[in-house]
Image: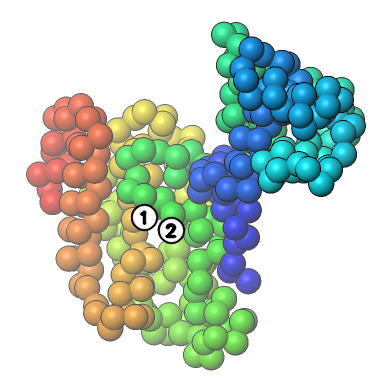
Amino acid sequence: MYMKSWVSCCSPWEEGGFNIKEILSWNKANLCKWIWLLINPTDSLWSVWNSAYNLKFDNIWTVKVKPHHCESCRGILHTRDFLLQVFGTADIAALSLSSCVSTCGKFQISKIYDLIRPHYAKVTWAPVIQNPNVLPKHRFICSLAFQKKLPTVGSLGKRGICMVNRCVLCKCALETHTHLFFKCDFSSALWRCILGWMRIYDRSNDLWKELPWCLSRYSRKHWKGSWYRSCISATIWLERNSRTFAGKETSLLVLVQQIQFQVGVRLLDRNIKANEEILTHLHSI
């Protein structure tokens, strides 16, 4: 199964997601601000009117939905019920809301969102795709590859979508994540060329063995570590899709040059200091 749930996609990079907001949880977080204003009355006309007309000066945690309540008030009370379900008691919920207030008295929606959203275990490969020097499309592909969620022919075959399980790159083996990264003859040769360009030798042909080496060898700010992480993200999936869906094949040499150009331009565009070693690599393209 290669599909990812939408909720898991909306988690941060550190938890294997794509660092986007889950709209339902974000909407609840926004409504939590109005609950906090009703708990802590201010001089605003909105809080005074709602306390008098909708709540009848009753406790926000115990008041029930009534026929005369408007849709916005019903939404606030439904969010109140959600907070009670998440935190257990009104006291804990109120304390959690208070913890989201900054020192200047401003309610921070992002903090309550982080409290109420679904949480997942942190992943070890997050630093690879968190690197700002990695192109967004390569970051997306690499994230799915590390989780083995790419729609390979093997994964599609299990869902009954594709019946012929053959790698379109080497045409002699089953297409799986382990094969593509980088047991396939074509992808393995491509990876060796990229590593040779970076003056890195005697490396493994296994993406999941490269990960700990990558994280331990170079710091996040080291330019060569940025290049390595960019290259490992850019390698093979786009060429696989081009051959599968467009019937276009790119030679190994041309593909290496394309990756070198994309990575080099991206890194220089991110204002990395162009020292002599970096320029030597760029001149080799």
Secondary structure type for disc 1: helix
**Does residue 15 show up?**
no
Q: Identify the residue position indicated by label 1 in the image.
A: 137
Taking depth in this image into account, of 7 and 61 the one nearest to the observer is: 61
Identify which amino acid the numbered label 1 is placed on. Answer: Lys
Query: Considering only vertical position in the picture, is 198 above or below 151?
Result: above
Query: Answer yes or no: do the residues labelled 2 and 1 have beta carbons within 8 Å?
Result: yes
On the image, the x and y values in percent for residue 267 come to 24, 39
Mark pair 2, 1: CA separation: 6 Å
In this figure, what is the number of numbered marks? 2
Name the residue rendered at 34%, 59% in the picture.
Answer: 235
Name the residue rendered at 41%, 50% in the picture.
Answer: 139
Query: Considering only vertical position in the picture, is 271 above or below 249?
Result: above
Name the residue rendered at 77%, 32% in the picture.
Answer: 54
Identify which amino acid the numbered label 2 is placed on. Answer: Ile
Locate residue 149: give its quadrant: bottom right
Disc 1 crowd rating (10 Å Cα; few below 14, some 14-19, many 20+) is few
**Does residue 258 show up?**
yes
Farthest residue to the left: give it: 283
On the image, the x and y values in percent for residue 124 come to 58, 42
Secondary structure type for disc 2: helix
